[in-house]
Structure formats: structure tokens, C-alpha cells
Amino acid sequence: MQMRGRANLLALCLLFASCSNETTEVPSAKTTAENIILKLADHEPQVLWNSLPESYQVDANQLAREAIASIDEKVYEKILLILRKVQAILHEKKELFLESSSLGLSEQEKRDFGANWNISREILELLLETELGSFEEAKQLDLGKLLAEAGPEIMDLLAKVSKIREGDPWEKSFVEPLRSVKVESLEESHDAALLRVIGPDGEIEEQNWVKLKGKWIPQEVRDGWIENASKIRETIEASDEKRDQSNLEIAMILGMIDRVLDQLDQSSSQEEFEANLMNLLKLASLQSP
């Protein structure tokens, strides 16, 4: 099962591999695949974006912007307000959380939880500083810019917290498997190629690649792009039809969360914090499916 999971991750990464810009000599499909793998292992996720033909980038940005624009502005701003309150609580109330009897953490769990806590706060702070931290800016979201500016830092933070965990799962389950992937070229013409991808556990997958507007991409991506984009747009349009009712429900839930967070933030003792934390946990359980 673990072998299959890693192979699927690697296959997904390879689905987005590509080459350089149209104005330069186009690398081979094999070089393209190897480049994406190495850059992901080096915490450069923007390579996924750079791998796409320009028309695909336009489509992806447009879909992201439509999805954000479909959210009521008041709801979006409320979510940002709550996230900023969470950020403040993560900064100021760490010790109260770690000593909470409701969580019942062991000493080892406190150390692990504390490390994850700091990283979570840094990731949240990082995301709120991007275009996502403003409704007006988010409506003009540039996914390539987001990946380039926030992606490497987020991956660095995930690697950092992983190093203090037993076995360093980020390195062992993500970086090392990526670096051990081998790519072989079986056939290649001007605009088509057949690659053999050998995973870290020896699993072999053959992939057909095509060159589209100067970019090598898996044929599977090209064949499914229009259909997948249409499905995403249909989902956005369907949510628009239920927008008013959904907004009322979401606003009510966000209002309750906001009030409980205010109570947590204002807690001055462990006892008071404990009572407010229980309220938050109860609220979370009510919203669980």
C-alpha cells in the first residue's frame, strides 16, 4: 500500500513535467521529466506551473479567479478575520494549549505538537501575506506567482518540522523517493514521446508525452484538460445557484467560531482557557459530518 501511494505521487508529479520557454531550444521529454522531479525534490514547486503551456496557465488562473469571485465578499473577509485571530492565538496561547487537560498530551506529544504549532503559524502567516490575504487581490490571483513566492518557503517549513519527527517522513517519503526515480526514453519524435518511468520500488509505468506549443506534457494531461476545466467550471456555477442559502449557513457558523476565538484570546488563566477550548471543540464536533 505504501509503495502504491508513493508511486501514485510520483506519477502525479510527472503528469505536470515540462520544458523551458518557446524562444529557446526545447529539451527532450526525458530531460523535462527529470527536471520536474529534481526541482520538486529541491523545493521548487513553481516548476509545475512553468511546465504548462501558456493557454493552460490562462485557463487555470481564470478558474481560480472565478472560484474566489463566487464567494461572497463578506464571507471571504470573515474567514480572513478568523484566520488572523487564529494566527494571534497560535502566537500568544501556545503554552495554554500544550498544558490543556482537554488535549491530554504526553511530554513527547507536547514537543511534537509544539514544533508543528510553530510551523503552522509560520505557514498561515505566509499565506495571509500573499494575494489570498485580500479579497480584491485574490480575485486577480496569479497561481504561478503564488507557487513561486510561497511554495518554496512552505516546502522548506514542512521539511524543517519533519526533521524533528521520528524518521524524518518528509525526506524519507517525499524527497528520497523523488530522487530515486529513473526516466528512460523509449521513443521520441518531433511532437510525441514514449517514456518509461521507474519508481523507487521498481514499479514501471510507460507514459505517452506530447509537445504542445513548445512544452512537453503528458498526453493524459492534454486529453483531459478541457473536460476537467469544464467540470470545475460547472461546480463553480452550481455553487453560485445555492449561494444565498449557503452564505447564510456559512455566516452563522463563522460567527460562532469568531465568538469562541475571542473568548480563547481573552482567556487569562488555564482554567478559563480550558472552558473556552471545550466550547470550541464542541462546536467543531457539531460541524463534523
Image (cartoon, rainbow, N blue to C red):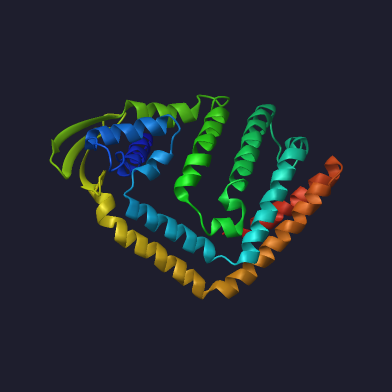
In this view, 141 is above or below 95:
below
Residue 207: percent from left, percent from top:
21, 42
* Residue depicted at x 79% and y 47%: 265
* In this rendering, position of residue 263 left or right of residue 90: right
* Residue depicted at x 63% and y 38%: 122
Residue 264: percent from left, percent from top:
78, 49
In this view, 149 is above or below 275:
above
* Residue depicted at x 46% and y 71%: 238
Labels in figure, total: 0
Residue 62: percent from left, percent from top:
43, 60
Give 189 or 267, whichever is nearer the viewer: 189
Give 182 or 57, whichever is nearer the viewer: 57
Splitting the image into 4 quarters, where does residue 49 fall?
top left
- The quarter of the image holding the N terminus is top left
Splitting the image into 4 quarters, where does residue 71 fall?
bottom right
Is residue 207 at least partly visible in the picture? yes
Splitting the image into 4 quarters, where does residue 174 fall?
top left
In this view, 272 is above or below 7:
below
* In this rendering, position of residue 17 left or right of residue 76: left
* In this rendering, position of residue 30 left or right of residue 266: left
* Residue depicted at x 72% and y 49%: 85
* In this rendering, position of residue 249 left or right of residue 202: right
Is residue 286 at least partly visible in the picture? no
- The quarter of the image holding the C terminus is bottom right
Residue 270: percent from left, percent from top:
83, 40
Which residue is most to the front? 23
